[in-house]
Image: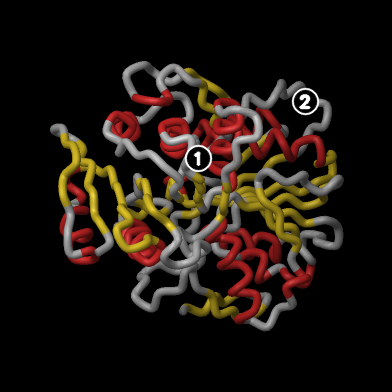
Amino acid sequence: MNRFTTSRGEFDLTRFPEDPRDPFRAWDAADEYLLRHLDDEQTDLSGTVVVLGDRWGALVTALADHRPVQITDSFLGRQATLANLERNKVAGEAIRLRTTGDAPPDRIDVLLIRVPKSLALLEDQLHRLAPHVHSGTVVVGAGMVAEIHTSTLSLFERILGPTRTSLAAKKARLIFCTPDPGLPRGDNPWPRSYPLPTGIGAVSGLTVTNHAGIFCADRLDVGTRFFLKNLPRRRGPEHVVDLGCGNGVVGLAAALGNPEAQVTFIDESYQALASAEATFRANVAPGTTAEFLAADGLSGVPAGTVDLVLNNPPFHTHRATTDATAWRMFNGSRAALRRGGELWVVGNRHLGYHAKLRRLFGNCEVAASDPRFVVLRAVKR
């Protein structure tokens, strides 16, 4: 836990899930710069304040007196916000929580934006928010210098109005935008769809829907392509989980390959779940059921209730390369699986997942491999 010191008070903040070994803080210099700017400019926060992309709740915790609306794509970020509010004895009702798929407030008077890693997600959200700002809306973006590019500023300029940037401070920068309600911004290009290639099993040639911010939104990534070619062939009633589902093509393949299976799609991204559900509904028979769950891995699934977990784990969190998420996914899978249940994982060879799976499950075999990827199978004994 670290203490976030601002002119509005000091706040004890952590990321989620809380891990005392986590070397990363729940805020950065961009959050500090943004709050300092609001104070220096004596920004009027009496109207509707919207905070987009607040990663771990640092901004809305500091601004809780103004009842901000938080819009996030991250289940983990939302849980961090709730935990940090409680930790700092801020009433939960002080913050209005919404996801990137929810309708924005009708009128936005102050719009604060933590620039996301995904330019597509920023584009989509600016399009969604633009009809709700007015000529007097204060719009301030914030990010580390490495996160703000010419293309970032172009999006603000094209969708909201004239845009300029601040000087850098502690490798952070602010974006100032003056909304022009009459700006001809065009249509929101998200979500997008594309046809899958042939030769990848049950989903060959089907159409995928991707909402903004999903990994490889314009094409099937090579790791998933390899996984789809080498999925287990199963029959009979069973519970299958597509863990970290993204656009849901792996879970869809499992559902089409075994019509008796009950498939649960899990991701921490609300955009991913919207993509997975749209992809699933477009490609299965009417009345086919599935569950779509925003969660921290398998934490929301009862222990010993799953027969098969299919997983293509991420190896980064924001800009940090780490196997912490994969390790949580593997541990969660072991807890959720029934005895005899299987975890199938695809990953780059160099990530060394086989060692972790062997340590955790006591076994691991290579189900398929090529020069770049491996598909691993571990069984709960």
Which disc is residue 183 wearing?
2
Q: Earlier in the sequence, mark 2 or mark 1?
A: 1
Helix, strand or loop under label 2: loop
Q: Position of residue 241 (x, y in %)?
A: 44, 49
Q: Nearer the viewer, residue 345 or 363?
A: 363
Tag 2 and tag 1, C-beta contact below 8 Å = no
Mark 1 residue type: Ser
Which residue is drawn at the image coordinates 75% and 61% (left, top)?
96
Which residue is drawn at the image coordinates 33% and 29% (left, top)?
225
311 sits left or right of 205 in the view:
left
Which residue is drawn at the image coordinates 44% and 17% (left, top)?
205
Residue under label 1, please give it. Answer: 118
367 sits left or right of 33 in the view:
left
356 sits left or right of 166 in the view:
left
Q: Is residue 87 above or below residue 232?
A: below
Q: Position of residue 80 (x, y in %)?
A: 56, 67
Q: Residue furthest left?
A: 371
Mark 2 residue type: Leu
